[in-house]
Image (cartoon, rainbow, N blue to C red):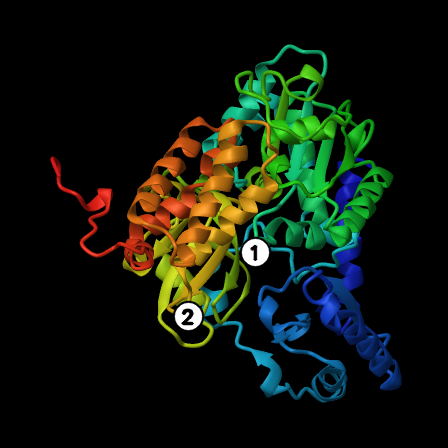
Amino acid sequence: MNLEELRELSDQENQRQATFRHRILYCSSAGCVPSSGESVKDVLLETLTEKGLSQSCEVIGTGCLGMCGEGPMVFVQSDKTLYQRVDATVARRIVVEHIAQGKKIKENEVETTGPFFASQVKIVLENLGRINAESINEYIAQGGYEALAKVLTEMTPGEVVEEVRKSGLRGRGGAGYLTGLKWALVLKGTAPQKYIVCNADEGDPGAFMDRSVLEGDPHRVLEGMAVAGYAVGANQGYIYIRAEYPLAIERLHLAIKQAEKNGLLGSSILDTRFNFRIDLRIGAGAYVCGEETALLRSLMGRRGRPTPRPPYPPEKGLWGMPTSINNVETFANIAPIINRGSAWFSSIGTAKSTGTKVFALAGKIKNTGLIEVPMGIPLREIIFDIGGGTSDGTEFKAAQTGGPSGGCIPKEHLDLPVDYESLATVGSIMGSGGLIVMDSTSSMVDVAKYFMEFCVDESCGKCVPCRVGTKHIHGLLNKISKGEATTDDYELLKDLCLMVKETSLCGLGQSAPNPVLSTMRFFEEEYTSLLRNAEGFIPSTQKEPGQ
């Protein structure tokens, strides 16, 4: 396939879609399918046939429609009507009443102009709910692979790297390193072989952003990886994905085959001299393999354990060759940046945190689901406008960002802008995008204990501070929660957290104490109230100099 044929295919697909009076899209993500998503599809098809409407209507599976707690969801594209809690009865009514008679089902209709949708800016998620998740033609009809065609025919590798650098795009996997600078380091490498790696080992509790993107728009990620390969001089890419994501794996396999068949991956892509292949590697679900050096070792068939840095992967990565590792969301931003320009992307968000961020809202919040918002949006707007406040109408207490590596943000910081720099000031991080909400019924000591237990289970055991330190921290938290700890235990807990943070080998150990330290900082009274000899005790953080 060449550029002209790509555009012809786009026109043909748009013309094909125009022949249907209605396109009915049902959520076929892992969140909705188990709750009757496929039976909804069957009822829609059967009823359309029964009413003689099967020739004028198309039923297709699409990606996550956002409001996961209200699924299964169905979107009637012709008049932009979104339905929630669709069971077999409602599915039949959609055809009989809405499609055949033009009468909307008000009790199941979602107000798409309401706060949940109005505050969002969709870049990464823009195709979810618009295209068939398993069709390369539908992706191409939305401008898919135009960015790849543009860089191959109009730009040099250095120009691509510079465009990404000017956009200000930072890695969406947690650390927030500038993507353009990482690519520039790999481009400068003179090794005979270079690699592109997509980190899809999403392991934070409550996080499902990357999974949703891969299930709903896999070609967006493949295209971003191919652009990255051209930019840095790599001809081989790998997607490292955890085995717990079978639907995402299935759709990635399909998408890769479709792209290869159409000459968009493999050899002589778009009739140019650029070759780029993408293979999948399935991880066993070890959280530590989200750390880049552990991921690379696992990808090479070795035990997934971190290694000291430097050297960093852009200098010496897979099999000792320059390697650029970015996560799913980062790659999903590449095509829009190339198509619309770095100035457009950098105009969204803040000066140092440009673009948007995808979050998975979970916990004690009314509207659980997947959202995409501009960087710098106040936390209050996410919790109360988009999220609808706490699920039971109780008082908001804290929000956890960054998963086991992040911190808890209390209600007094509700107006904090959600960007890399602001989150760091309150002891938290952006992380991959999990956002868990807690209300007045939540025990912050138990929250800290839960995340520490997770880190204990997921520690690879290579370094003593993480292997032993996290166990002792969890033991002290357990002792405090039972009311058996003393003030000495409390001070020891603080010292242990700082030791593990400062001396662990990799990011897992270095960030494991963050939830504990942040809850001790903002909810210290919950800890001290459980100490056996707390009367008159002044925690070291509250002591005046000389005390």
The disc label shown at residue 206, or none? 1
Q: Nearer the viewer, residue 346 or 13?
A: 346
Secondary structure, mark 1, is loop
The disc label shown at residue 499, or none? none
Q: Report how far apart the C-alphas of labels 2 and 1 lie in the structure.
A: 18 Å
From the top left corner, tell me how far across and down residue 532 is, in percent. 31, 56
Q: Is residue 168 visible?
A: no
From the top left corner, tell me how far across and down residue 48 is, in percent. 83, 80
Q: Is residue 70 above or below residue 524?
A: below
- Of the numbered discs 2 and 1, the one sitting upstream in the chain is 1
Q: Residue at x 71, y 60 (%)?
A: 30
Answer with left or right where residue 262 lies relative to residue 332. right
Q: How many marks?
A: 2
Answer with left or right where residue 540 lies relative to residue 89. left
Q: Residue at x 69, y 49 (%)?
A: 214
Secondary structure, mark 2, is loop
Answer with left or right where residue 282 lies relative to residue 348. right
Label 2 belongs to which residue? Answer: 389
Q: Quadrant of the N terminus?
A: top right
